[in-house]
Structures are given as structure tokens and as C-alpha cells.
Image: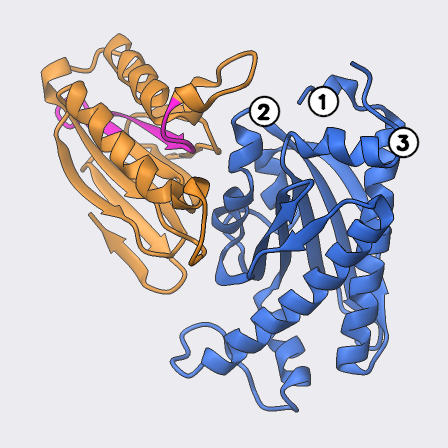
Amino acid sequence: MSEIIKVGIADINTVSPPDTIRTTGLGSCVGVIIYDQTKKIAGLAHVMLPDSSLSKAPTLNEGKYADTAIQTLYKILVKKGADLKALKAKIAGGAQMFQFTSGNEMMRIGPRNVESVKKQLLSLGIPLVSSDVGGSSGRTIEFDPYNSSLTIKTVNAGIKVI
Amino acid sequence: MDFKKIQPIHLDILREIGNIGAGHAATALSTMLNKAVDMSVPSVNIISFEEISEMIGGAENVVASVFLRILGDAPGCMFFMLPIEQAERLLEDLLGGQAVQLINENDSAISLSALQEVGNILSGSYLTSFSNFTGLNLQPSVPATSIDMAGAILSFGLFEISTVSDYAIVIDTAFTDIEKHDNVKGHFFLLPDPDSYAKIFHALGVPLDE
């Protein structure tokens, strides 16, 4: 029996076949999947904010910020036996749910999340294989570690696989 | 913002803000539709981000929403949100009975514009009474409309609070159309920014203990 592993907001989890991993209702948040196609190990982080320097909380929730979430996910995957050099990434999300003419910097959070995720992947030397980012639609994404396919569902544009 | 400082009396104050605010909004809606609108007793909860989407049927549930920023003395976010079918019925009533479809409809500009106006009027009356009650200077931003997954929309109101906490205080008031007695409900969500709570409580003479 295969299961769907759910990842909530600011959460991180991992998956291996026959299970799949999913996160729902990504708005300006970004879903980051890092996977080892040969060993069929994958992890998903639901990133909410671009940088942990924004945190004003007494304890840092690592899954919330692009920089700490990706580093944490990377470490977890390595610990689970993924091959460092084989790691690849797919990302989706980072939409601008509402359009404002005069928004503050917080209103541009989607694009900022995407930029930060890409920068972080680059610094760890993880190639970004494909992405579906931006726009103004919410996304639900599901990753299958067996064939490394990422299925993206939106309200207005239906389903696509990257 | 430390949630441990929040006493039951503070939650009561927030509930009263929800009560008065949504009461005025329900009256405005009732006038617009020319029929009775019923309102629930507001709930005030300190809940995780995940649970907020559950309140409106799960992160993937498609809703029609109007969002605005509250500007002024106590900044925050406000959402007027309702299930898609309910939004369509509401707009049909408003637009004189013509059928309204909000999804996959090329010609929905007038419906969206009407939805935005409804949200604007309702949030405006909510905010005016919030401002009168507290004596705080509060103005709404220009509203923005979105029809999408509840989780994707709500997370937009959580960025300010998410830098300090994994939880948010949500002041939620639901209302229903009395005649139809259906369970579909509209929701007002009021999400003050972390620094705004102290200002709200101070304005009402019940400051948070330092």
C-alpha cells in the first residue's frame, strides 16, 4: 500500500517509493523538492519566508525559511544515504496571490522566496531541474520519488507534470 | 509578541471586536441583499497556521476572498472569505438574478468587481466599528480579490506574524443567510500584526503585563 506523506506549512519531510509526498495550498510559499533519482530518496520543504534573518522568534523554526529549510533538508537527505553529487531539485510556488499597486516589501514575498530558494540551491551545488513558479494561482504539489515527477494542480489551469 | 501574556480577558476583548465589527458588516450585507443575515458568536483562537485553513474547509478548498491591509495605528490583515458556491449565490442576488460563475468564466469581470465591492463595503463597516470601539485610527487599503485555494490565500495574511511565531490569533465570525438555512458560511478573519495587539489592548485600558 502506498501512502501520501503530507507536509504542512513551514514543515519538512522525506519520502521513498512506493509512497509519494505532497503539500497543499502553496500561495507565495515555495515547495522545494530535493531528490536522489538513483537511490529514490526525496524530501520536500514548504518554505514560507525568504531568509531566517527575518525571524524575531525566540526559537528558530528551520522549516519556515528558505535558507535554513534547504540546509536542513539537505542534511536529512545526506543522513538517509542520498548521494551528495546526485542531488537535484524541483520547485513550485511563489505566486503573488493579490495584486497591489502600492504594496510594501512583504507583498512581494512570492518572488523573494523563489529568488532565495534558487540562491540557496546554487550555493549547495544542487541543480534545479524544473520549476513552476510565479503567477497568481495557488498550487498543490505532489512528488513521486519513483520516477521523480512533480505533479502540480491549480484551480484555474488544471494539472501539469514537471 | 508573547502569547503567554495574553489573558482570558484579552481574548474576550478580541471577541468583542469581532462581535461589533461583524455585526455592523452583517447589517450592511442585510441592507444590500434586502434580507435577514444571521451571525455567529465570534470565535477567537490561538491556533497553528495549519488549523487556520481547516476553519474554512482545508488548504485546498476553493474560496472567493477579498483581502485588505489595515493601515494606521494597529496594522493587520483582514479577509472576507466564502465558499465559491456561496459567493456565486450572493452575487446572483446582488446582480438581480443573472447566473454567476466565478471559475472558468471569461466574462466574469463584472462578477469579480461586484465581489470586490461587497468585500470593500463589508470590511469597511467592520473596520469603522473596530476603529470607533478602540479609538484607534485605522484605514483600509484598497481591497484585492482572489478566487483560489484557501491555504494559498490565507498564508498571505500570515507573513507578519510568522516572523515571530508559528501561531496566530484568529478572530473569526461566520454568517449565514437566514431564509435558506444552508450551512454554507461566509467568514471574516481579522489578523492583527504582532505589534498591534499591545496597542489594541492599551487603547481599551487592559494592557498586557510586561
Above/below status of B126 relative to A65: below
Q: Secondary structure at mark 3?
A: loop
Colour used to depict chain B in the structure image: blue
- What chain is tagged by disc 3? B
Q: Using a 10 Å C-alpha cutoff, classify the residue at mark 2 as few (fewer than 14 neighbours), some (14 to 19) or many (20 or more).
A: many
The residue most toward the left is A85
Tag 1 residue:
B3
Between label 3 and label 1, give the one nearer the viewer. 3
Tag 2 residue:
B165
Tag 3 residue:
B205
Residue A146 horizontal/vertical position (percent): 21, 34
Q: Earlier in the sequence, mark 3 or mark 2?
A: 2
Q: Amino acid at mark 1?
A: Phe
Q: Residue at x 42, y 47 (%)?
A: A27
Q: Amino acid at mark 3?
A: Gly
Which residues, given as a range, are shown in magenta?
A33-51
Q: Using a 10 Å C-alpha cutoff, classify the residue at mark 1 as few (fewer than 14 neighbours), some (14 to 19) or many (20 or more).
A: few
